[in-house]
Amino acid sequence: MTPTLLGRWQTRILLFQTVGLLVTLLFTEGVIGPGGGVFLWVLEYLFIFGLGWDVLYNYLQKFRWDRDWPGALQLAAGVWEAFFIVLVIGFFGLPGIFFLDLGWFLVHYSLVWLAIYIASQSLMRILFPRWRFRGGVWL
Amino acid sequence: MRSGTSQIRLSWQEPATGELREPLLTLPVALGRVLDQMPAQLQGQPVSRIVLDSGQLSRFHALLTLEQGNLTLTDQNSTNGTWINGVRQTRGILNSGDSFQIGPYRIGIVAAGARAAARTVRSSEESFIQLDEPNEPEQAPERATSNFPPACFRSQQVRVQDLYATGLPVEEIDYAGVGAGLGSFIWVDYLRNFGVSRQQIKVVGLELEPYAKYQRLCLNSQIPAHERLRSNSDSCPDNLWGWPSYALREAWHDFQKGSMASAWRYLWQVFAEPTLAETYTPRAGNVFASIDREAARIGWEQMYQYGRVQAIRKTNDGRYAIAYSRGRGDHAFLVTRYLHLATGYPVVKFLPDLQEYRERTNNFKSVVNAYEAHDHVYQQLERQGGTVVIRGRGIVASRIIQRLYEARRRNPNIALLHLMRSPKPQGNKFGTAQRTVENHFEFQPFNWPKACWGGELRVQLEQASPEQRRSLISDWGGTTTADRGDWKQIVQEGLNQGWYQINFGEVIRVEPDPQGRPTTYIREKGPKGEIKLDADFIIDATGLDGKVKSSPLLNDLVTHYNLPLNPLDRLAVTNHFEVAEMRNDRGRVYAAGAITFGGPYAAVDSFLGLQYSALWAVDSLAAARAPRLKSLKGWASYKQWLKWVRNQAP
């Protein structure tokens, strides 16, 4: 992956609100786990914070000669984003989230991350043949 | 340096093109990025000002002067510094054979004074050899004969009636490709997947397999089918989506055969490359096999036409006439609305001193180019042992070293002398990033930083002015090799055991010794002066040349229509790879590959770069409502992909 900032944002918007949402619906409807709207709140907070993290990732990417962002770094970023949101919820709390079961959060988060990663590696390329040449811009 | 000499000859390879520059200059010499920022006069003497294209240079970077008879280099408080013989210095004395580095430029002092003036140097622009060509039905390669192309080709626009009047076969078509190599194939693959039918397309070239020339260059440069190309996993000439990638396919294949370890390794490589794992690259044989499958799927054979294109002209009805010969004096015309030029590299660069040696001695066996067939070198070495001089330090040199390492297993009496023009103390810098260097080899997974294909660097180059592009290309390009563990290990082992040595210096001349073996005389840095390298073979691994004027066809087109060239002397194309000056009413001409290098895109000669240029060109045709061409996206793209999976015609 060699994303641009615009590409990161556009891809994040699309994949969180489609693939991420579909996976989350399994959790809110109780197909997996206890159910409840909290999973949707979590997804949208991850999404909003992520738009900010993308600016940081884009900055860090400039220190890499190839200006790329391999899967391994996407995973590291994913671990960091999960850690961050758990800290924020634990210490400060976030509107809409009254209680978060850490175990189910991790299951939900991991599935969302995996689904988005796989979709970005396969489905995005097939539906948007120009996406990979435009640093993740699909619009 | 003797006192009183006021002239020096500098020597460097242009980082953007690899071309050799050896100007003879009168001291003082100023080097920098901006002409106006360098002094025109110093102490009443006119200054030779050399403008070098790179963002890593300061506007006035360094000054060469004669001080008390010594050639002195002074850094002008530059941002990125000056390295003299591999050590960062602000001021130093230089002798013949010394070298210094500023930005991506590694500049050698060839000679000074009388010697410099007397030395005749063949310019690297005139030093090349033709690529091997397939056997043709015709006796000799046929250039334009007296009556073909016909006289009507002298005008700016050819009347289609005049073509029919010649009595020669004329075929009219919507889309025509010239070249029939990988560039043409990928363009046609896009056309077919975008809805164009087989009957609307014709491609003229010399070989049926689109990868024939590429494969020959691979085999000559010692990449057989089982070896890996320097290409990305998702650069798939057979699949415009890049999915499934070659790594996934190879992993699946190995998984089915029960080789779990290698299957996981490929998946891990594409996940973690290049930071935590060595970059995955596909096997040459797998790539060619996948192209065979796609060629059959899109009906390549039915669209292919054997022929050597002699000339291309605009017609008076908004199309283009292609005059080509089918061998044995059999000529024909193709008239098309849309034309795609992808003729590839016309020639192989050959180091001028080696070219001169071959011409003088008529010995084509002991001094060879890595891109020529030269298996006899390894056969003789494996039989008798011997010494090889390697010139150049790119990916081809690495592969040749690997091949010689394999030969050493059969015969340990093989020694390698790697001749490099100058040390490489540090890699190119761009912004906050720097390329890594080890043992004077500079590493990069592919021939450009990865973001040149589809990331930030692609955007930056596309938006840059032609002059800025030249500077960016200097900073990102240059000679690099892949960071492969096995290659680094071979080099380290060879250095430790002594059978592989690196020599620095400028070649003065290459001459045959009494046994007819090529001896290289080089000027080494420091006071040692001239030294001799005796060898059985010299292998030039310096690269290919894509200059337009090396191709008779393109040269004719450029001359006839007064087409502009870009700052690197290749065809100037728009961001959609159109040759804008060839626009003829509704007719359009596009170009791809090496002949467009120096334009909006850096990696034009790669698989993925050819896909990029094809996609941008075909998109612009779709916007112009070219017949039966529908933009491919979303659901339509998915349906076409399913056809690819099922191996059905698009």
Image (cartoon, coloured by chain):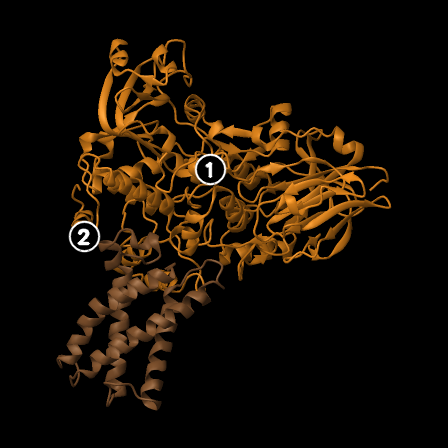
Residue B556: where, in percent of width, then height?
Answer: 43, 22
Label 2: chain? B
Q: Quadrant of the N terminus of chain A?
A: bottom left
**A126 on left or right of B376:** left
- Quadrant of the rendered structure where residue B128 is? top right
Residue B484: where, in percent of width, then height?
Answer: 49, 56
The residue where tag 2 is placed is B638
Q: Secondary structure at mark 1?
A: helix
Q: Taking B607 as reference, is B23 above or below it?
A: above
Q: Quadrant of the C terminus of chain A?
A: bottom left
**A56 on left or right of B305:** right
Q: Secondary structure at mark 2?
A: helix
Residue depicted at x 34% and y 63%: A8
- The answer to whether residue B421 of the structure is visible from this angle is no
Visual hue assigned to chain A: brown
Numbered badge on residue B220 = 1
Asked if marks 2 and 1 fall on the same chain, the answer is yes
Residue depicted at x 75% and y 33%: B116
- Quadrant of the rendered structure where residue A98 is? bottom left
> What letter labels the chain drawn in orange?
B
